[in-house]
Amino acid sequence: MKISLDGRNFDLTTSISTRIEKMVDKALQKYESEIVQATVVMDFEKHRKNGQPSAEVKLKVEIPGPDVVAENKHDDLYEAVDGALDKVCDQIQKRREK
């Protein structure tokens, strides 16, 4: 499975990339035979108007048929990725059950 990462408004360091790739790989491992590619677009702002950090993640998983897409927001980048992964896994599982 190919995983591509795109970071916006922050430096996507090697350690962040590695950790997120591992998260995505682990979460989608049981669907790996069906997945062509997973794309993670992360937007992180350290200082919003209210002073709290904000992370927005969009996860697109290319599988046979329509692609599966999920978005999630959280104060923590890794929590935002984890929430998007949960949504994608739920959608893939529902599609399998049909």
Image: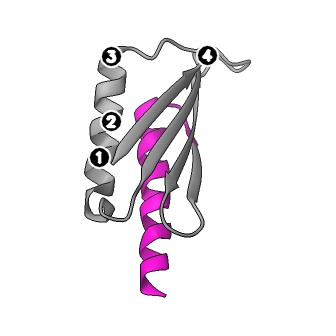
* Residue 8: % across, % down: 60, 21
Looking at the rendering, the stretch of residues picked out in magenta corresponds to: 73-98
- Mark 1: few/some/many CA within 10 Å (<14, 14-19, 20+): some
Other residues around mark 2 within 10 Å, as few (<14) / some (14–19) / many (≥20):
some
Name the one closer to the observer, 5 or 80. 5
- Residues at discs 2 and 1 in contact (Cβ within 8 Å): yes
Side (left or right) of 14 relative to 60: left
Instruction: Kindly identify which numbered label has been placed on residue 25.
Output: 1
Q: How many numbered marks appear?
A: 4
Q: Quadrant of residue 17?
A: top left
N-terminal-most mark, 2 or 4: 4
Which residue lies under the disc numbered 3?
14
Q: Secondary structure at mark 1?
A: helix
What residue sits 64% from the left and 16% below the top? 51
Residue 91 vertical position relative to residue 95 in the rendered view, above or below: above
Q: Tell me which corner region of the image, top left, top right, bottom left or bottom right, holds residue 67.
A: bottom right
- Nearer to me, 23 or 53: 23
Lower position in the chain sequence, tag 2 or tag 3: 3
**Residue 64, image x, y percentages:** 49, 67
Mark 4 or 1: in front is 1
Please name the residue that numbered disc 4 is placed on.
9
Return the residue at label 2: 21
N-terminal of the two: label 4 or label 1?
4
Amino acid residing under circle 4: Asn
Q: Earlier in the sequence, mark 3 or mark 4?
A: 4
Q: Reply yes or no: does residue 17 show up in magenta.
A: no
Q: Position of residue 5 (x, y in %)?
A: 46, 31
